[in-house]
């Protein structure tokens, strides 16, 4: 959380005469109360991260970060990523409003729970995704996949694939970014507490774009 100025402006009960240490200290305290200086910037929090390769030297990394303010709002949203043909990128170049730049949707189906965070850069659409797959039966424990779909203006597509499931915080993402009204299920897909069901035929949601 952002650091604040000193909790202060308490009156010193001790009486002092002349320019005593107590008086000087009181004047300095009053000065810092009136002019506490700039707050120390908070460190960004990770909302979504996944990658591939060894931790010490990943071959790809996809991350969405933001800063949670004291009033409960999110600021300084930014996507960072590289690898598997994706040149190192940061969007926006300076962290900005999640409500203006990023769009959330989620849905559930027989093939798993699916989350998308979409954003657009210079006409190219990017779609972070995570799918949590249910157990297939027997000893199967289920699984997951995550990555980034990239859709060029001419319709060409490619995918950056992570190793397994990501670390993500659905509630925070929902708070920090806007509703993706362009997803096939509309506004209902923006509610993570009452997740809508998608049909098996919803290929726009479940397959590569």
Image (tube, rainbow, N blue to C red):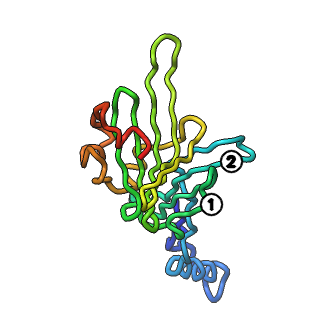
User: In percent of the image, x 52 and y 81: which residue is there?
Assistant: 35
Q: Residues within 10 Å of mark 2 (few under 14, many from 20)?
A: some
Furthest residue to the bottom?
18
Task: Write the residue at 71% across / 43% down.
Answer: 55
Residue that sits furthest to the top in the current view: 138
User: Quick one: 128 or 95, which is closer to the camera?
Assistant: 128
Residue 37, percent across and down?
56, 77
Q: Secondary structure at mark 2?
A: loop
User: Where is mark 1, residue-wise?
Assistant: 88
Whether residue 115 is situated above or below residue 31 in the rendered picture: above
Residue 49 x, y percent position in the rendering: 55, 47
In depth, the one of 13 and 209 nearer the eye is: 209
**Number of the label disc, if any, that sits on residue 55:** none
Question: In the image, residue 70 lies at what x, y percent?
Answer: 44, 59
Any part of residue 5 in sight: no
Residue placed most toward the observer, 18 or 43: 43
Which residue shows up at 39% across the image and 38% down it? Answer: 206
> Would residue 64 appear left or right of 111 to someone viewing this image?
right
Residue 112 to residue 205: above or below: above
Label 1: element kind: strand
* Quarter-of-image position of residue 202: top left
Disc 2: which residue? 59
| In the image, farthest residue toward the right | 56
Residue at 49% across, 80% down = 34
Labels 2 and 1: the sequence-earlier one = 2
Q: Does any portion of residue 19 appear in the rendered image?
A: yes
Total marks drawn? 2
């Amino acid at each position: 959380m952002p650091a604040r100025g000193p909790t202060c402006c308490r009156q010193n009960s001790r009486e002092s005469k002349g320019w005593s240490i107590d008086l000087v200290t009181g004047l300095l305290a009053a000065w810092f109360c009136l002019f506490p200086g700039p707050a120390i910037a908070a460190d960004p929090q990770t909302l979504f991260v996944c990658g591939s390769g060894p931790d010490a030297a990943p071959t790809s990394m996809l991350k969405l970060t933001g800063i949670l303010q004291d009033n409960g709002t999110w600021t300084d949203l930014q996507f960072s990523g590289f690898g598997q043909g994706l040149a190192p990128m940061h969007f926006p170049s300076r962290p900005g409003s999640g409500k203006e730049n990023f769009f959330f949707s989620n849905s559930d189906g027989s093939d798993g729970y699916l989350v998308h965070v979409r954003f657009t850069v210079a006409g190219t659409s990017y779609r972070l995704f995570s799918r949590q797959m249910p157990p297939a039966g027997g000893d199967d424990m289920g699984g997951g996949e995550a990555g980034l779909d990239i859709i060029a203006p001419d319709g060409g597509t490619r995918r950056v694939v992570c190793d397994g499931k990501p670390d993500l915080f659905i509630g925070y993402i929902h708070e920090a970014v806007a509703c993706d009204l362009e997803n096939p299920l509309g506004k209902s897909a923006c509610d993570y507490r009452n997740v809508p069901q998608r049909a098996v035929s919803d290929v726009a949601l479940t397959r590569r774009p």
